Image (cartoon, rainbow, N blue to C red):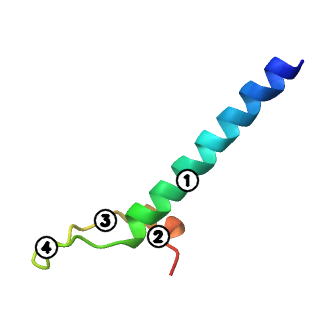
C-alpha cells in the first residue's frame, strides 16, 4: 500500500510542476522584443495576470 501511495504522490507532484511551468510559460513574453508570438485564446485560462 505504501508503494502505491508513493507512486500517486510522485505523479501528483509531477502534475503540479507541469501546471506551474505552463502558467509560467504563458505569463512571460519572449525576450526578443520584436518577436511576440500570437497565442490561442485557450491559454488565457492559464495566465496569472
Q: Which residue is the site of mark 2?
A: 44
Identity of the residue drawn at 51% across and 65% down:
46
SS for tag 3?
Answer: loop
Q: In this rendering, is residue 10 above or below 27? A: above
**Circle 1/circle 2 CB separation < 8 Å:** no
Identity of the residue drawn at 39% across and 62% down:
25
- Mark 1 vs mark 2, CA separation in Å: 14 Å
- Mark 4 vs mark 1, CA separation in Å: 25 Å
**Of the two numbered discs 1 and 3 in the rendering, the one whose residue sits closer to the viewer:** 1
Mark 2 nearby-residue class (10 Å; few <14, some 14–19, many ≥20):
few
On screen, residue 19 versus residue 6, left or right, reads: left
Which quadrant does the N terminus fall into?
A: top right
- Mark 4 vs mark 3, CA separation in Å: 16 Å
SS for tag 1?
Answer: helix
Mark 4 nearby-residue class (10 Å; few <14, some 14–19, many ≥20):
few
**Hey, which quadrant is residue 5 in on the image?**
top right
**Hey, which quadrant is residue 42 in on the image?**
bottom left
Task: First in sequence, mark 4 or 1: give its number.
Answer: 1
Task: First in sequence, mark 2 or 4: give its number.
Answer: 4
Identity of the residue drawn at 60% across and 43% down:
15
**Of the two numbered discs 4 and 3 in the rendering, the one whose residue sits closer to the viewer:** 4
Mark 3 nearby-residue class (10 Å; few <14, some 14–19, many ≥20):
few
Marker disc for residue 19: 1
Q: In this rendering, is residue 47 above or below 13? A: below
Q: Which residue is the site of mark 4?
A: 32
Task: First in sequence, mark 1 or 3: give its number.
Answer: 1
Marker disc for residue 39: 3
Q: Position of residue 30 (x, y in %)?
A: 23, 70
Amino acid at each position: 500500500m505504501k508503494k502505491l501511495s508513493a507512486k500517486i504522490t510522485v505523479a501528483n507532484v509531477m502534475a503540479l510542476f507541469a501546471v506551474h511551468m505552463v502558467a509560467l510559460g504563458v505569463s512571460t513574453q519572449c525576450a526578443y522584443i520584436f518577436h511576440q508570438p500570437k497565442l490561442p485564446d485557450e491559454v488565457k485560462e492559464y495566465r496569472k495576470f
